Image: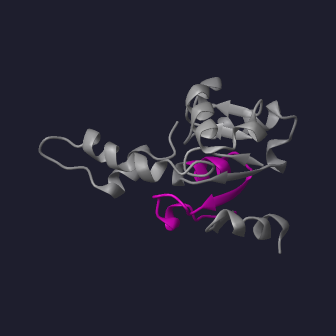
Amino acid sequence: MVFDCDGVLVDIERLAVRPQIALGAEPDRPLTADESVERFVGRSRVASSGSHEKTRHALGRTGPYDPFAGRIHSASEVARGKPVPDPFPYAARRMGADPVACAVVEGSGPGVAAARTAGTRAFGYTGGPTPAERRQGPGTVVFDGMRALPGPLTGR
């Protein structure tokens, strides 16, 4: 399993959209929440678009850092980050796994598309601000809530 951090392991994206709207707006054209999600969410073991420091801080503040320590991979380690699929095969190979045998849990449309392009099984988590339809696509299981994930993973 390869997990995204922001929006999956840590629900930061919902909070991040507000300042992105304020900072990303042009003086004569306000930025909507949908535009903010489209432009910024999901762009570049844990394969995050964020830096190691940001991911370590986010996971440390919310609690789940220890189980992922030593298995966190950043887009800064590859030539191109999401929405290009490079972080996923990289994370899989670093963990000694065949990327095609991995499953990726992503919370953004670009992340899900990158997982599909990488040839991994894609799971689109609908807990963040990205509309569910942006996570849908061929070979993608869309689910709502982490408690629902074991069923799709095991086929039950």
Q: Is residue 98 left or right of residue 10?
A: right
Look at the image and say whether residue 116 sits in the magenta stretch. yes
Give the vertical position of 132 relative to 38 (above or below): below
Res 38 visible: no
* Residue located farthest toward the left when viewing the structure as drawn: 28
Tell me if 95 is positioned left or right of 144 in this view. Answer: right
Q: Is residue 152 visible?
A: yes
Q: Is residue 43 magenta?
A: no
25 to 106, vertically: above or below = above
Q: Which image quarter holds the C terminus? A: bottom right
Residue 13, given in percent of the width and then of the height, sits at 47, 49
Q: Nearer the viewer, residue 50 or 117?
A: 50
Whether residue 113 is situated above or below residue 5 in the rendered picture: below
Residue 64 x %, y %? 69, 44
Residue depicted at x 73% and y 46%: 2
User: Which residue is drawn at the image coordinates 25% and 50% (left, top)?
Assistant: 31
Identified at 78% across, 70% down, the residue is 151
In the figure, is residue 41 to the left or right of 80? left
Residue 110 at what x, y percent from top left? 53, 49
What colour scheme governs how the chains and residues are painted in the rendered image of this protein? one colour
Per the rendered image, the range of residues in magenta is 111-139
Residue sitting farthest toward the right: 96
